[in-house]
Image (cartoon, helix red, strand yellow):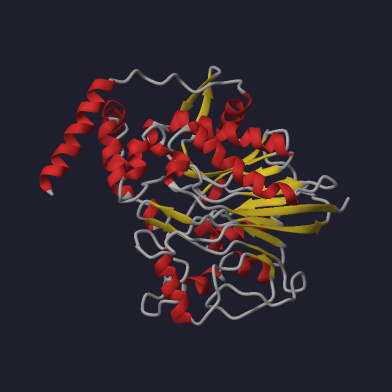
């Protein structure tokens, strides 16, 4: 039976205060589904796709003071010290970096908050939900209890059905420098673990951000019968800057030119992957800048009207595309990108565009079998359904934490 369905890509704008409490995070996530609500179809299945790393800033949860600092690196350092009774044992026992220890220290609470929030939204809005992606541990069930693989923290996409049940999980394979040591220090996923999930809204394959540029990832998804590529994205630089990971460092291209080599190139050249959904988050997180243009792409015959990223020529293949904040000549656009960026001091700082894209798509009935769940997916489903709960949080030493934080701040003031 032919599948008729709608896809929705949400381009939200985040802010540090969205992550300082459980309630703030739930409100921010709900706001994205509220943006999508007018476009949800009741006469056919709807897939809503959210953005990459949309729970990463939950390291700020419970520390509103950290959201007022100037840089994310500074916030991470002070949070590590403030949470030393939890972070230091992790650093020593699991032999991880301070950045990974800080994230692992809050991983049970933040993972549960993220998954339960997404499950509630998928059920309330009645949609298939690609939750975006988030740094999460690799879980397992042992004797009915949740455990995690020591030291492991991957950039994971979780896909839920309208009942809030798990369809599948995908790890990011190719990490950017900001996700490697010296940055978030995440664990790369394994190419052999990539799978395709047949659903009423397409045979879904996930290529998180950089993975959508990589031939090994796309080739593996094609070989497994992917028809709809999901590319959750968080581009951590000005959209009109030069590319950050050039194949030829001697010939840097404008970033939107490089972006044509992800979802757009896949769907306009692949004989297997028919559509792609690429939502991109925007906004400044302390000193970090995120910008881009969200898109839904297909074959040229699916979208013959020429459209374009800024700084590129119009071309077919864009079924839906978010305009950038303005049009203009290249020099003007580059200046605008600098004005929008974090700590620019310009009146237009952080004045990015939010948007919601939608498209009604058609595919033949799927012939793919549902892949068996991995041990990690079984554990994620148990957490989602409430069949298993995260371990209780260890007791902390509030007085020691407060004293450490005040000492660090006092030392910093004396150095100025």
Q: Nearer the viewer, residue 114 or 407?
A: 407
- The picture places residue 243, in percent across and down from the top left corner, at 43, 70
Q: On the picture, is 245 further left or further right than 141?
A: left
Q: Nearer the viewer, residue 240 or 250?
A: 240
- The picture places residue 210, in percent across and down from the top left corner, at 50, 59
Q: On the picture, is 80 further left or further right than 6?
A: left
Q: How many marks?
A: 0
Q: Is residue 5 above or below residue 168?
A: below
Q: Residue at x 31, y 30 (%)?
A: 90
Q: In this rendering, does residue 397 appear at all?
A: yes
- The picture places residue 406, in percent across and down from the top left corner, at 20, 32
Q: Residue at x 83, y 56 (%)?
A: 364
Q: Residue at x 79, y 48 (%)?
A: 41
Q: In this rendering, does residue 244 appear at all?
A: no
Residue with the most extreme front position: 347
- The picture places residue 43, in percent across and down from the top left corner, at 85, 47
Image-quadrant location for residue 267: bottom right
Q: Is residue 6 above or below residue 101?
A: below
Q: Residue at x 56, y 38 (%)?
A: 27
Q: Nearer the viewer, residue 383 or 369?
A: 383
Q: On the picture, is 233 further left or further right than 75?
A: right
Q: Nearer the viewer, residue 63 or 190?
A: 63
């Amino acid at each position: 039976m032919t599948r008729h369905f709608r896809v929705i890509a949400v381009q939200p704008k985040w802010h540090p205060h969205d992550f300082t409490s459980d309630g703030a995070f739930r409100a921010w996530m709900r706001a994205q589904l509220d943006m999508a609500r007018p476009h949800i179809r009741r006469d056919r299945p709807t897939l809503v796709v959210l953005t990459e790393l949309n729970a990463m800033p939950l390291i700020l949860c419970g520390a509103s003071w950290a959201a007022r600092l100037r840089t994310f690196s500074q916030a991470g350092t002070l949070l590590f010290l403030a949470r030393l009774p939890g972070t230091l044992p992790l650093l020593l026992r699991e032999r991880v970096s301070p950045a990974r220890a800080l994230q692992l220290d809050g991983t049970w609470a933040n993972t549960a908050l993220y998954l339960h929030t997404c499950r509630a939204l998928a059920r309330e809005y009645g949609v298939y939900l690609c939750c975006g992606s988030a740094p999460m541990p690799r879980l397992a069930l042992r004797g009915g209890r949740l455990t995690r693989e020591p030291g492991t923290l991957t950039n994971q996409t979780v896909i839920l059905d309208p009942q809030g049940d798990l369809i599948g999980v995908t790890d990011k394979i190719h990490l950017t420098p900001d996700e490697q040591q010296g940055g978030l220090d995440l664990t790369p996923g394994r190419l052999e673990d990539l799978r395709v999930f047949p659903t009423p809204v397409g045979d879904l394959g996930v290529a998180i951000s950089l993975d959508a540029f990589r031939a090994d990832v796309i080739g593996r998804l094609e070989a497994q019968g992917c028809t709809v590529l999901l590319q959750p994205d968080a581009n951590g630089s000005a959209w009109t800057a030069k590319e950050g990971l050039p194949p030829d460092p001697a010939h840097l291209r404008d970033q939107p030119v490089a972006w044509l080599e992800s979802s757009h190139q896949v769907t306009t050249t692949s004989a297997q992957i028919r559509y792609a959904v690429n939502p991109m988050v925007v906004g400044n997180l302390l000193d970090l800048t995120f910008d881009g243009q969200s898109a839904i792409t297909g074959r040229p015959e699916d979208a013959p009207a020429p459209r374009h990223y800024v700084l590129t020529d119009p071309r077919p293949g864009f079924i839906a595309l978010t305009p950038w904040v303005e049009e203009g000549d290249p020099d003007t656009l580059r200046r605008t990108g600098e004005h929008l960026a974090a700590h620019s001091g310009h009146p237009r700082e952080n004045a990015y565009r939010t948007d919601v894209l939608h498209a009604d798509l058609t595919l033949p009935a799927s012939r793919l079998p549902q892949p068996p769940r991995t041990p990690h997916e079984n554990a994620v489903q148990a957490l989602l359904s409430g069949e298993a709960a995260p371990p209780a949080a260890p007791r902390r030493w509030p007085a020691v934490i407060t004293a450490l934080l005040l000492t660090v701040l006092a030392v910093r003031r004396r150095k100025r």
